[in-house]
Image: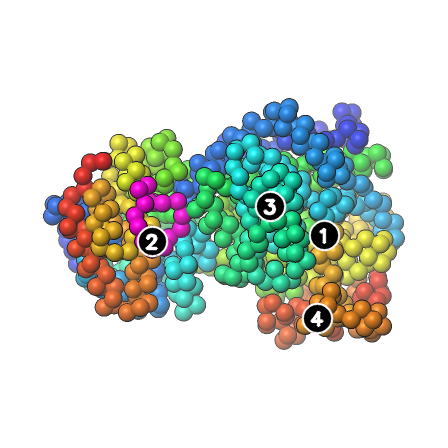
Amino acid sequence: MSSSTSVPPSSQVTASQGIETPSGHEPDARGHFGRYGGRWVPEALVAALEELETAYEKARHDPEFLAELDRLHRDYTGRPSPLTDVPKLSQHAGGARILLKREDLNHTGSHKINNVLGQALLTKRMGKKRVIAETGAGQHGVATATACALLDLECVVYMGEVDTRRQALNVARMRLLGATVIPVKTGSRTLKDAINEALRDWVTNVDSTHYLLGTVAGPHPFPQMVRDFHRVIGLEARAQVRERTGRLPTAVAACVGGGSNAIGIFHAFIDDPGVRLVGFEPGGDGVATGRHGATLSEGSPGALHGAFSYLLQDEDGQTAESYSISAGLDYPGVGPEHALLKDLGRAEYQPVTDAEAMDAFSLLCRTEGIIPAIESAHAVAGALRLGKELGPDAVILVNLSGRGDKDVDTAAKWFGMIGQDESAEAADGTAIAEGELATPTVGAEGERATPTVGAEGELATPTVGAEGATQQRAGSFAHPGSQTEGIQA
Amino acid sequence: MSERASDPSARSVADVFASCRAEGRGALVGYLPAGYPTVDEAVELLTAMAEGGCDLLEVGVPYSDPVMDGPTIQAAADTALRNGFRLRDVFSTVERVTAAGGNCVVMTYFNPVLRYGVDRFAADLAAAGGLGVITPDLIPDEADEWFAASDKYGLSRTFLVSPSSTDERIASTTAAASGFVYATSIMGVTGARDSVNSAAAEIVRRTRPHTSLPIGVGLGVRNGDQAAEIAGFADGVIVGSAFVSAAERGGPSAVRALAQELAAGVARAGLPQPA
């Protein structure tokens, strides 16, 4: 069932269609996608998961709920999000036509609001007054804090201490919105540990509290429900691409951490066998260095955070620490439906290194005037790679899942505009304006997932390591698209 | 099943609870993570807990993401992992503690078992003299492979029931269990608390009609009076974080003393009264 006839025009696509109309790719009654998914949770949470499942099943057939969701997404989120042709960027992608699905233009700055508004409305319906959430980059936390402010819910956000430092702007946004932000200081102090802490809170306060999980991972019904709230991305984009180009895309590119924006855009194309679905995972310093978060590319099946899926683990089943310059992708697990799509071969997953992502980041800034989230820059880098592979006749749809305001500090350090100890807000603007940018060492061509800096010793310190290496390899920002010698391992 | 060198009366978890009952009392169950603070010291600590009066020992598997555990056990697991604990060490720990006279079950988050291989894990645990496994994040719904392996090697399967469990869940969970049922007394993670929550008696009362298995109650117990209170209505009193804190404070002599205090509390209570 591909293409043609019954596709509604993009102007008629609504968010509620993603939950009201079954996708045709549902999990089994216990939430399994093939062997993946399910409920790998303490018994204490089962009653709450059953309550949520029941509430969701009821809501998706309730015209009042669907109308409220659509009203909010139209008037508050700003849906539908536009589709943007980026011809100058496309010149760097072998001439393939790249189209960006602009989830970065949603209210709160990313796709996360799609899921958050849906779950916040469900929370009200379940009669719960308190919402907890985990966040990595802070985008899900900001979206959750926003929805809670709008709908009068108490909001507590768990965020790894490493992430509160590298995404300070979003911490401030959450607090301005009235949320309590709890820096998590256990384990690797990133997203994985924020989820642990949120689960502990939920086990303790499950009667009064909804855990507003921000990705398509976790126990059933989260992977299905969160996916359905994000299906609007693909439903809109599919119609928009057809209207714009008269055809379906050759390939769809998205970044994959937990996998919510990717599943949201992939899902509308699963039954179009001619459309390649490619997820781009955080390759960090290169998968060969071991410092990465490429769960599907490098991981193995196991149970983490309530679902059976791929994860990064050692031979004893201890979760491995992930690494990415992108806080939102820095996670050693992934949603179970992606695990199934990988095993089926319906979607493919490739790592993109920090350096490739940052080159794509600078290129998109300079060529098209769009500052992407570093997460989304991984998808842009992937599209550049796909374009060269597929050639000038290809149409590549990219989910630009978030905007990059939150990443200005990280990017300014990467590109050598400020020192490693400085923050962009506090730095001397004159110095930034007049400063020299370092010589580029990594090409914008995006060498395929080879370690770009692996042999250099400065990567040992987790929280500052990658940033510490940036002075030398910075400057591709100064010369967007410059063809320099990639460092091959 | 394998021959047990130390205590020929206890070939199963059921035997442990039965022999306590024959003495007119409930069972004291003590938890400590294997490898805490090191593999050898944990063996010594667990042995001291058995000597002090723990009828059954829960040998914990340190895990990177213990979502059911509070700060005390999280920190202990971190210590064990930092000190080089490997999963295979749990089998040698069980073997050594069993040889010293303890009755051991393993308490583990399930991913390490999945990674090791469910059948292989069960085989190696049974060979080491382990009596069963408690699975805090495995519910019967996902346990098909574990049912087969535990049956094959004669290991007890302890699943948890919680105050939030529906009656239907309690029925299906206890039906799937063997050895004993673990009732979590409160909503929350592990950690010693000052008072025993009234929810503890309530969850035992709700579970009783669904099963003839002994019911152990855990989460929050730290002293002899609390142990006596729980032993008044439950068949087993499960103590974890308090043993970890005692080990940290005073090593084997402290955990032995705590076990003695708790065992006296359990004995004082006599057999559980019907709720």
Residue at left 30%, top 38%? B202
Q: Position of residue A178 (x, y in %)?
A: 62, 49
Mark 2 highlights which residue?
Answer: B193
Q: For the residue labelled by badge 2, is the local secondary structure a helix, a strand or a loop?
A: loop
Q: Is residue A151 left or right of residue A398?
A: left
Viewer-nearest of discs 2 and 1? 2
Q: Amino acid at mark 3?
A: Gly
Residues tagged 3 and 2 counted as in contact (Cβ below 8 A): no
Residue at left 27%, top 45%? B216
Mark 2 packing: few (<14 Cα in 10 Å), some, or many (20+)?
A: some
Where the C terminus of chain A falls, by quadrant?
Answer: bottom right
Q: For the residue labelled by badge 4, is the local secondary structure a helix, a strand or a loop?
A: loop
User: The numbered mark 2 sits on a residue in which chain?
Assistant: B
> Same chain for marks 2 and 1?
no
Instruction: Give the residues in magenta.
Output: B184-199
Mark 1 highlights which residue?
Answer: A376
Q: Nearer the viewer, residue A372 or A208?
A: A208
Mark 1 packing: few (<14 Cα in 10 Å), some, or many (20+)?
A: many
